[in-house]
Amino acid sequence: MSAARDQTADPTAGGRVLLEGADIHRALTRIAHELLEANKGPADLLLLGIPTRGVPLAQRLAQRLLEVEGTVVPTGSLDVTMYRDDLRRHPTRPLLPTELPPEGLDDKVVVLVDDVLYSGRTIRAALDALSDLGRPRAVRLAVLVDRGHRELPIRADHVGKNLPTSAAERVSVLLAERDGRDAVVLSSAPSTEPEARA
């Protein structure tokens, strides 16, 4: 989703909790193992979280990789605001930091990390942003939730949970780092917060 959210709105009101903290922990642990298997170890991995909730998810994945392999995998953040194709409709998006490790991303296996994969437009913007920052050896995508409804030919390599949804439903990811608790909530109730077409 990766868009700024109204922190005063309660996304769980009238919603159904689909994942609790323990479920999210297990999903991230599984993704960490999948990353290690696909990459044949942690060498040259770089985790880039897409703000806002992709950043703490990337940090959590790095912690899991450290626990499994004993290796520190560098993390950073990648702001895609200026690369989005909906800026004309939503021109007041806040700019968030892009932070890369000192060694950059050339020849790295960059893993983009986000909370929810929806239309695919956020990831398209992320790929455009990456091309301005360097030349990774490969780019992979890890998401906590894939809710379907793709508008572009983009798919995740690593998914915590596939959640078939209708376009009228809302998927809200809550993380302790930003929201005080971990949960994934499905709701059809209207919200004051415009949903990003990520």
Image (tube, helix red, strand yellow):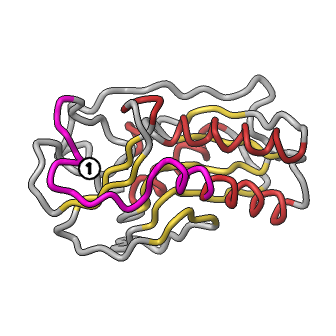
Element type where label 1 sits in the image = loop
Q: Hey, what amino acid is under mark 1? A: Asp
Quarter of the rendering containing residue 51: top left
Magenta span covers which residues? 8-26
Q: Position of residue 26 (x, y in %)?
A: 62, 56
Residue 10 belongs to the span the image colors magenta: yes
Read off the residue under disc 1. Answer: 86
Q: Position of residue 1 (x, y in %)?
A: 37, 50
Q: Position of residue 142 (x, y in %)?
A: 60, 57
Quick check: 28 above or below 186? above
Residue 162 or 93: which is nearer the viewer?
162
Residue 150 belongs to the span the image colors magenta: no
- Left-right relation of 101 to 186: right
- Left-right relation of 21 to 61: left
Residue 134 or 80: which is nearer the viewer?
80
How packed mark 1 is, by other alpha carbons closer than 10 Å (few <14, some 14-19, many 20 or more), is few
Quick check: 69 above or below 138? above
Q: Quadrant of the C terminus?
A: bottom left
Residue 164 or 182: which is nearer the viewer?
182
At 38% from the left edge and 48% from the top edge, which residue is drawn? Answer: 173
Q: How many marks?
A: 1
Quarter of the rendering containing residue 7: top left
Quarter of the rendering containing residue 56: top right
Q: Position of residue 61 (x, y in %)?
A: 67, 44
Quick check: 93 above or below 139? above
- Left-right relation of 7 to 17: left
At 36% from the left edge and 32% from the top edge, which residue is drawn? Answer: 179
